[in-house]
Amino acid sequence: MAKYLIRRFCELVLTIFLIASATFFLLEAVPGDPLSERADKLPVQSREILYKRYGLDKPMMERYVLTMTRMCKGDFGESFVYAGQTVGGLIHDRLPVSARLGLQQMILGVTVGLLLGIVAATKRGTAIDYMVVGLSVLLISIPHLIFGLMLQKIFAGTLRWFPTIGWPAGKDLWLGGWEYTVLPTLTGCFSYIASYARLLKTSMLDVVNQDYVLTAESKGLSKGAIIRKHILRNSFIPVMTQLPMSVGMCITGSFFIESIYSIPGIGQYYVTAVNNQDLSIVLGETVLLSLLYIIILFITDILYVVVDPRIAMPGQEH
Amino acid sequence: MHNMKKALALLLAGVMTIGTLTACGDGTTEVATAGDAGTVSTATGSGDAAAAESTGADTQVMNVRTTAFGNNYDVQDMGWRWMMADCYEGLYRNVADSEGEHFVLAGAESVDVSEDGTVYTFHLRQNAKWSDGQPVTAHDYEYGWKRLANPEYGYSYASFIYNVVGAEEYNLGTGSADDMMAVALDDYTFQVTLEVADPTFEVKLVATPLYPTRQDIAEAAGDQWGKDWTLCVYNGPFCMSELVEDNKMVWTKNPYYWDAENTHLEAINWYIVSEDSTAATMFDNGELDQLQTSGDYSIKYQGEAEAGNVQRLVSDYPGTIGLRFNFFGNDPSGLMSNVKIRKAISYAIDREEMIEAVYGRYKAAYSYIPPAISFDGSSYRSQTEEVISTEQAEYNNNPEKLQALFQEGLDELGVTTPISEVTLTFLSSGSTTESQAEREYLQQTIQQKLGCKVELNTVGDSSLLKAERDAGNFDMMYGGWYADYNDPLDFMYTYYTDAYGTSFAGYSNPEYDALIDSLTGETDIAKRKEIYQELENILLIEDCAFAPLYYSTKEVFLQNWVKDYRTSSFGASAEFYITYIEGRNK
């Protein structure tokens, strides 16, 4: 077990190093730099001073080494575009906001999705089944932007049930200001509903035809008991492996939802930073988010073993 | 074993959840909501509004839309221009009223100018105070100006004061702050000595880089100066009092402002609303009092304004947009060195038709200096004729004449390719409906009228545009200029050889440069005007280095209860200092 952990840790360090280097060089390969927009409007002599001020007058490899050295100390530097903004500050101020939004969407979306999946699978071939499947296809095809603006127009504009924009902060950051979170949560939860409903339905249908289900049926077990004890448990393997990835995805924020509802989350900032070629912020966020994914993948591996005892932990006797 | 795995999994899942919870802790103490202020200030129906109604007064709160916060509160750095001029104040304030854009005395009560025009002595008002109650003194101005020139900070606008004795040397590292002649003679007298007399000096004084800065406060903030707004003090009508990034900013009235009794608004709430559709919903609900929008929404509210449901403010904005031609000598067609070719392209475009078809706003441009630029007390354009309108009228609706002009150009270059096989490359950027319509209109109209082919080189954003420009992958490109200060020179200087590096596509004309140089120290207003006319003539007629297409304008929609709201081009984009609310609760 210890050997396995050490190996995973070394892999992690290597992966992060490769990701950071790739991010650095990819951003360098894009024409222009974070200052070009500002510099273009300046007399030539002022441009040199500006580049010097941000250290962008140095050659690329020197900056690469400097950036990497600083990164090892956990310092990603300051934003080129937004004065004073650091990666640490972003994580502290914005990640909680995106995390609450994402978790709310996921909890609601996955719960409803799984229930619909069960209904569709048990009522296979009926009108309900077709409705669930049809709805899933529809919900997954409508972009968040359109959906969000539609909800906003109807529920905040015409009906005035909820505020149009905003997000709770301060003491309400985690548990409060619910009225602000309703529309953004709804906007995002539909894609979870659609994907989890389809995932569970497909998986349940696979299991239904297994021999042990036939055996259970022939033993005379009630339909409910068969679903609960045999079908559900076994058809949950794909769901369990999908779930941690969803958690990872959901807390990193959604650009469109955050942007239409003016939610000060991390997803919006990330996209803006990439557009601005704001190297320090992009690098910092990419590295931290990669770290998060790698950890989540590791947890997923362990969850596999828990859900399906047939899979052995590496380095463990079978 | 089985149970242990289960426990392990549970533990991990728990750690994950707690991890996400604790990583965040307690963020800010502010509430990032739109509704709280909305209900206070919105139309009837809410309890607060009813309370305000019973007292018969309007809540003096204004809710305003923007799409991004500047996130830089350092006046010397030009920071967020909208905020700077509302929360800070310089020697002069720029106002836009029935007399156009002009400056009025603000931090200065009077000014003496020496006979030769090189020494300006500003007598400051003694009742001006910072938001912490301290007086605004000449030392604050001296510190601000010397800070601007300090090479350590690398401020972009340092060149604004290069004409001040010793400033350029200090900024370029060969002089010292002590030798820079912007000094406090006493607490309320600030004196600036110029190298040579400069009639454009005073119009620059409205720009925020020349505003005062408190040495004690700025130095205490260290490298957080201008970055952390909580460390700032303000000497303008408003103070920043709350900020939630990407969501909301609040300004409240500065009780220490010298003219506080004429400042009516108690608070201004800025909301980040990125989608026009959302902003329209909020404007309709009364959650927003002011709206800047575009496209179909602009048309919708123009209708509402005609019906009297909202107010519409349209003003000239000092920007001119058009086509720049490739003067680097590496243009793909190899034709851009010929002025007749350039003119044929320029005159092929029907400006009136284009702004009608593509933008539905703006003004057709036939010169480089836009109407928003003032000169000697009135709009420069009202004093001189549009430069290319006569020639344009002669050619525009006459395709044979245009083609003959184009053919003459080809002949002069010794090119034997028939016009129909000539291909021109047009560089532009952006993916909005408008930018698409723009480039397609130009492509079509040039192809149709000249009979050549136009190929589009379209890139995603402005940094890619610059890369393509510097690589010379264009014959003509979309571009223009938005003014930094209110004088024709600001526009004319852009085409001075290499003044802005490659930004102006490599244009260079010694005669043009010599004329610009001759403006240095020229104080005769009539003579200056003559030179400006000559410059525009060289640029647009003799050389046709730029094909002006439109002058920018600004359109703002306001609720009917918003009174005395102004926009200005050189101060704060939105001037709230005399704005008030009346009749919101009716």
Image: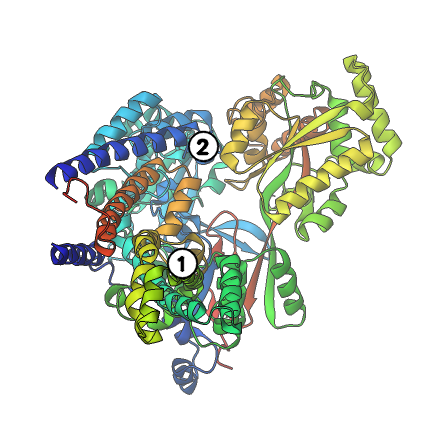
Amino acid type at image mark 1: Asp
- Residue at image position (41%, 37%) is A277
Q: Identify residue type, mark 2.
A: Ser
Callout 1: SS: helix
Reply above or below: B376 against A41. Answer: below
Q: Which chain contains the residue that carries disc 1?
A: A
Is residue A55 among what the camera can see? yes
Q: Could you say where residue B344 lies in the image, as x and y percent from the top left?
A: 78, 29
Question: Which comes sooner in the sequence, label 1 or label 2?
Answer: 2
Q: Which residue is mark 2?
A: A36
- Taking A316 as reference, is B399 left or right? right
Q: Which residue is mark 1?
A: A206
What x and y, as percent, mark residue A82? 35, 43
Indicate whether A225 appears above or below B438.
Answer: below
Identify the disc placed on residue B407.
none
Separation of marks 1 and 2 at Cα, in angstroms: 56 Å
User: For the residue labelled by badge 2, is the local secondary structure a helix, a strand or a loop?
Assistant: helix
Q: In the rendering, at what x and y percent does residue B464 appear?
A: 52, 32
Which one is in front in this view, the residue at disc 1 or the one at disc 2? 1
Q: Residue furthest top?
A: B414
Does B5 sit above or below residue A122? above
User: Looking at the image, which is closer to me, A237 or B309?
Assistant: A237
* Residues indicated by labels 1 and 2 sit on the same polypeptide chain: yes
Give the chain of mark 2: A
Q: Closer to the camera, A49 or A165? A: A165
Q: Residue at x 33, y 75 (%)?
A: A224
